[in-house]
């Protein structure tokens, strides 16, 4: 697996937040958007964009480094994390708000995948994204709590070039 590029990781999170109106509502949603960024990028270019490892947790694929990167971003004042009560019958939701404009250091290929993920998945809820990932080969083909092999992305049946 590629080494994690924390700078790229931060840029991806800021880019997603920027494109989704300045914020991402929910840890689950952010985790799943990162999954789609990394696995779509791997499917097309045979490498991950962030370099993170994903575990098959009960609510779907989860990037193991995400929470540490978010903590660092808060310390660097790049994002804020607020708990908001979205619905009375739900636990408070973590809202990730971008505080700083990101540097745009994405290649054409990276930009293509990021824009595809925003367009295809950005308007979905965390629960909808969870359901989608639960139906995909990488999650189905991995034992609970184990690392998801990026190579399983080739069994998802997506067409990265046309499937936007």
Image (cartoon, rainbow, N blue to C red):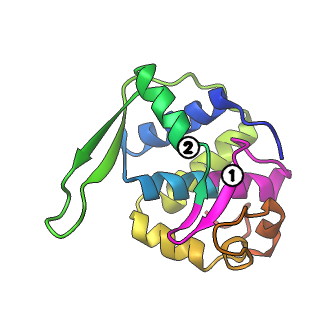
Residue 13 located within the stretch drawn in magenta: no
Residue 52 located within the stretch drawn in magenta: yes
Q: In this rendered view, identify the residue nearer to me: 160 or 23.
A: 23
Q: In this rendered view, identify the residue nearer to me: 153 or 160.
A: 153
Say above or below: 94 vs 77.
Answer: below
Cβ atoms under marks 2 and 1 closer than 8 Å? no
Residue depth check, mark 2 versus mark 1: number of the one nearer the observer: 2
Residue 4 place in picture, x, y as percent = 73, 36
Q: Residues within 10 Å of mark 1 (few under 14, many from 20)?
A: many
Q: Which residue is drawn at 53% across and 61% down?
A: 120
The residue most toward the left is: 88
Residue 163 place in picture, x, y as percent = 66, 67
Q: Residue at x 48, y 51 (%)?
A: 30
Residue 45 place in picture, x, y as percent = 83, 50
Q: Which residue is drawn at 66% across and 76% down?
A: 136
Q: Earlier in the sequence, mark 2 or mark 1?
A: 1
Q: Which residue is drawn at 77% across and 67% down?
A: 153
Which contiguous range is marked in magenta?
A: 37-61
Q: Residues within 10 Å of mark 2 (few under 14, many from 20)?
A: many
Say above or below: 158 vs 2.
Answer: below
Say above or below: 79 vs 114.
Answer: above
Which quadrant would residue 137 be assigned to in this image?
A: bottom right
Gap between marks 2 and 1 measured at Cα: 13 Å
In this rendering, would 11 be left or right of 141? left
Q: Quadrant of the C terminus?
A: bottom right
**Residue at which label 2 appears:** 66
**Residue at which label 1 appears:** 38
């Amino acid at each position: 697996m590629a080494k994690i590029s924390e700078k790229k990781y931060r840029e991806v999170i800021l880019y997603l937040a920027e494109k989704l109106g300045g914020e991402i509502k929910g840890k689950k949603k952010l985790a799943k958007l990162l999954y789609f960024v990394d696995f779509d990028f791997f499917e097309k270019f045979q490498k991950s964009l962030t370099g993170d490892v994903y575990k098959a947790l009960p609510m779907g694929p989860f990037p193991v480094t995400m929470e540490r990167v978010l903590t660092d971003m808060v310390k660097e004042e790049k994002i804020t994390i607020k708990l908001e009560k979205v619905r009375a019958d739900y636990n408070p939701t973590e809202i990730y708000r971008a505080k700083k404009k990101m540097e745009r250091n994405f290649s054409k290929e990276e930009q293509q995948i990021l824009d595809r993920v925003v367009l295809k998945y950005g308007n979905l809820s965390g629960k909808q994204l969870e359901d989608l990932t639960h139906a995909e080969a990488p999650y189905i083909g991995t034992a609970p709590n184990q690392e998801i092999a990026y190579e399983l992305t080739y069994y998802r049946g997506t067409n990265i070039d046309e499937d936007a």
